[in-house]
Amino acid sequence: MNYIKAILLVIPLFTVNLKAQDKMELFPAELNIQPFTANFLEPKLGFILKINNNELRLDIGNTIDILQYQLDESTSLSFGADMFTYTFLRGETDFHFPVDAVDYLFGFNGSWKKQIGDDSYGIRVRLSHISAHFVDGHFDGKNGVWLDNRPPRVYSREFLELIPFYSWNSLRVYGGFTYIFHVDPINLGKDIYHLGFDYFSENILGDNLHFFAGYDLRIVNIYDYHGNNTLNLGIKLGKVHGRGISIYYKYYSGKNIHGEYFDYNEKHSALGINLDL
């Protein structure tokens, strides 16, 4: 995919008539559509420590709305960008955490949302690239071999993702579809199906403490169809749709999320901490 062409497609968003400038906001403080809580492929800033397994996942990244535009009092559009990594580390003695594998994602996103009182519905679209790599922590320098006799392999994909949603008060449900228009290895499937929900409670103690839950199901096509299940349960200190810190329990089963391990099955429980900026 030629990203220059993709950028040219969104340039008209910036040529809004000057009479409508009061409806347009550059770099707004809040996203038009918040990330889906249990979807692993969302930008985070934190880590996940697997229980009874000396492994760690580190997330560094962000998503921003570059522009938001109000079509009317209840309808908004946005255009933004995503850039983040999710990294697999192994714990060793003396507080060492060698980096085994890292995945990079960058791309663009757009959204449309309609607000009706406390309810809302809309859709988020993402055009993204992911590439995966082994790092020096996957290499046994003493013996000069790759761990588990598994050398690096090429893994990357470019995809278009569409996720519509409906939100009632604090509960949001969503479904969607991802079309992978280029993937290495080339014999992998090109369709992914999404279904899930997230929920944030009303204030527990004051205005800044909330319980949340989320579930995400991804049907992935890796030589055959498989279900990836993610469940998150936790509390957030801060604003529901603003800055804060989240502490949560996570359960995951399905294919490994890291591209270098894409055909490995995995099941684990974990504790996570995330900073919402």
Image: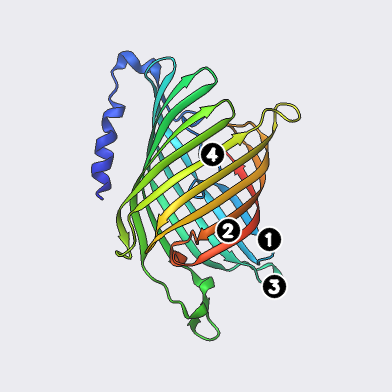
Mark 4 residue element: strand
Q: Earlier in the sequence, mark 4 or mark 1?
A: 1
* Amino acid, disc 2: Arg
- Scheme by which the image is coloured: rainbow
Q: Earlier in the sequence, mark 1 or mark 2?
A: 1
Q: Which residue is mark 3?
A: 93
Residue 208 lies, in percent from the top left, at 70, 30
Q: Which residue is mark 2?
A: 57
For this rendering, which residue is in front, 225 or 6? Answer: 225
Q: Which residue is mark 4?
A: 197
Q: Which callout, 1 or 2, points to the residue nearer the camera?
A: 1
Q: Which callout, 4 or 1, points to the residue nearer the camera?
A: 4
In the displayed structure, would residue 93 be above or below residue 44?
below
Density class for disc 3 (Cα within 10 Å; few <14, some 14-19, many ≥20) is few
* Amino acid, disc 1: Ile
The Cα–Cα distance between marks 4 and 1, rounded to whole angstroms, is: 24 Å
Hey, which quadrant is residue 6 in on the image? top left
Q: Is residue 56 visible?
A: yes
